Image: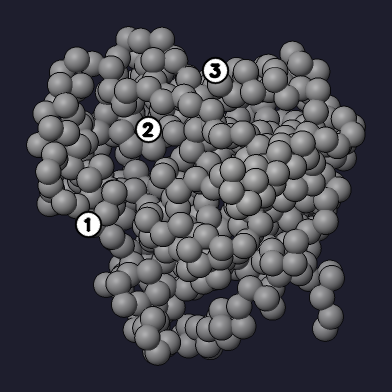
């Protein structure tokens, strides 16, 4: 064996010995990620959606009414949350760039727990697909894959399209994936674990059982309600399609900029969706029905995991945090999917339940960001916060939900040669689209949530808003560093 291999083996053995080596009374973490989850849930006041298990988690913890991702697409959002760094630091703006290309030595959230003696493992989608990080885990992620479709006709369609891709070159893995898609939805009368989220819950339960006697950081990444909208028939049957309300604003914002919306190419990649133009009203109803069914299916799998946590006697020693990686449009603004700086896309669910918190079942309207999750879990577990982390722990809000907090939440989205930087304050959403080459402003948006909570009218260019735009421009340019500490902790 070469010296290099000997050193590598020794390092791996040392890391394995460290995993789970702390005292058993340290606080565990159950870290639950949900793909493309909107705040359209029972606990967020949308009673049409059946989400009893997310609702019961909220009843035991704190629901964050205004939590925002740093970029409304999977990999940049997850990268930011898991590294504790904002997109302009990670320089991950797409689905293909691995964060270690730009930040080779950054310590991720699960890696920090691993380095602190925790057993860390994942199942499902935590980092974006194909961009996992072996340094973060004590053992490789559990395997829980299932065929995407269960109906024979859909499996045959995907097989034909997959065969047609052989020998072809694609610019990105996403482009290859899009060439092999089937329909945008499926309703099959099959068991829960015939699809991946049921298998993910199975694996998560086994992981909890295996780790119950040591401090753990277990990450569970559910795939639904991400496209395609596939769920067992019994979850479709929870809803009456005709009773599902359509989007209340199926039109672009008035005076929207040319950068505001995308063409929802993610949905158009599916076999039964038009490549140009709108979907039909019947397709829109089916898609929304499918989204709701997938939420309820995922919720049931979460319930199984939470039940096992209770059965193992781990509930009172485990912090549970649930987050959706970004929002999603369901026909709002004549659009679908994410990929914008609008409220529909940047706003996402966040629930944190910590043993011993004073205000169980609380809600807070404090502005928080997903980059804040890393330092929060460090504080709750009694771990030091790494110096590179760019968020602010929201742990104090678990006990005092109405505590004065951040003045703004920051998101961004690239559109080719421009970058849109967006600031969400208590009342406004303000976005500047600037050249990525020289920072020159190309366009701007202002939405007044006091009178326009759906963001249906961009009022940035109205003369009466000139002073407001100037003030928000200054606040946005001052950036997150000026707003990272709660107002009560800042000087004059």
Q: How are the colours assigned in the image? A: one colour
Mark 3 and mark 1: Cα distance apart in space: 35 Å
The nearer-to-camera label among 3 and 1 is 1
Choose the circle earlier in sequence order: 3 or 2: 3
Q: CA distance from mark 2 to mark 1?
A: 29 Å
Q: Which residue is nearer to you in this view: 474 or 213?
A: 213
Look at the image and tell me whether residue 343 can be seen.
no
Q: Secondary structure at mark 3?
A: helix
* Of pointers 2 and 1, the one earlier in the residue sequence: 1
Is residue 254 toward the left or the right of residue 482 in the image?
left
Q: Residue at x 46, y 57 (%)?
A: 98
User: Do labels 3 and 2 touch, CB within 8 Å?
Assistant: no
Question: To which quarter of the image does residue 233 belong?
Answer: top left
Residue wearing tag 2? 291
Query: Which residue is tagged 3?
Result: 202
The residue singled out by tag 1 in the image is 171
Location of residue 124 in the rendering, given as x and y in whole percent from the top left corner: 50, 33
Q: Is residue 60 left or right of residue 26?
A: left
Corner quadrant of residue 368: bottom right
Observer-side mark, 3 or 2, equals: 3
Indicate the quadrant containing the N terminus: top left, top right, bottom left or bottom right: top right
């Amino acid at each position: 064996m070469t010296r290099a291999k000997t050193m590598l083996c020794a390092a791996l053995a040392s890391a394995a010995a460290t995993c789970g080596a702390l005292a058993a009374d340290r606080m565990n973490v159950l870290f639950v990620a949900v793909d493309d989850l909107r705040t359209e849930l029972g606990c967020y006041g949308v009673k049409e959606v059946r989400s009893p298990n997310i609702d019961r988690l909220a009843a035991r913890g704190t629901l964050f009414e205004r939590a925002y991702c740093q970029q409304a697409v999977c990999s940049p959002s997850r990268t930011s949350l898991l590294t504790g760094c904002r997109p302009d630091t990670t320089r991950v703006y797409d689905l293909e760039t691995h964060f270690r290309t730009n930040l080779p030595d950054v310590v991720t959230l699960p890696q920090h727990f691993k380095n602190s003696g925790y057993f860390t493992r994942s199942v499902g989608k935590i980092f974006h697909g194909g961009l996992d990080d072996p340094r973060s885990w004590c053992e490789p992620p559990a395997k829980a894959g299932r065929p995407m479709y269960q109906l024979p006709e859909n499996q045959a369609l995907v097989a034909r399209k997959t065969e047609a891709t052989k020998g072809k070159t694609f610019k990105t893995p996403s482009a290859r994936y899009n060439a092999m898609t089937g329909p945008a939805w499926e309703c099959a009368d099959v068991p829960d674990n015939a699809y991946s989220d049921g298998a993910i819950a199975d694996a998560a339960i086994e992981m909890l059982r295996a780790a119950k006697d040591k401090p753990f950081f277990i990450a569970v990444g559910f795939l639904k309600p991400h496209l395609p909208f596939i769920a067992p028939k019994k979850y479709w049957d929870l809803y009456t399609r005709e009773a599902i309300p359509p989007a209340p604003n199926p039109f672009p914002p008035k005076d929207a900029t040319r950068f505001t919306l995308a063409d929802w190419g993610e949905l158009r990649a599916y076999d039964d969706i038009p490549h140009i133009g709108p979907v039909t009203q019947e397709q829109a109803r089916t898609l929304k029905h499918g989204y709701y069914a997938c939420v309820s299916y995922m919720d049931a799998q979460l319930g199984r995991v939470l039940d096992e946590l209770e059965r193992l006697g781990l509930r009172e020693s485990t912090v549970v945090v649930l987050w959706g990686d970004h929002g999603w449009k369901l026909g709002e603004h004549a659009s679908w999917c994410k990929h914008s700086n609008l409220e529909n896309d940047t706003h996402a669910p966040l629930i944190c339940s910590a043993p011993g918190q004073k205000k169980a079942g609380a809600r807070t309207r404090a502005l928080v960001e997903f980059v804040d999750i890393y330092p929060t879990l460090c504080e709750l577990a009694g771990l030091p916060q790494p110096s590179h982390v760019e968020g602010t722990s929201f742990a104090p809000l678990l006990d005092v939900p109405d505590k004065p907090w951040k003045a703004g939440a920051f998101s961004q989205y690239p559109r080719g040669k421009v970058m849109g930087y967006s600031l969400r304050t208590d009342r406004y959403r303000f976005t500047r689209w600037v050249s990525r080459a020289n920072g020159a402003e190309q366009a701007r948006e202002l939405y007044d949530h006091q009178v326009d909570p759906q963001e249906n009218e961009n009022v940035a260019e109205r003369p009466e808003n000139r002073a407001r735009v100037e003030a928000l421009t200054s606040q946005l340019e001052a950036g997150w560093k000026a707003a990272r500490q709660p107002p009560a902790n800042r000087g004059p």
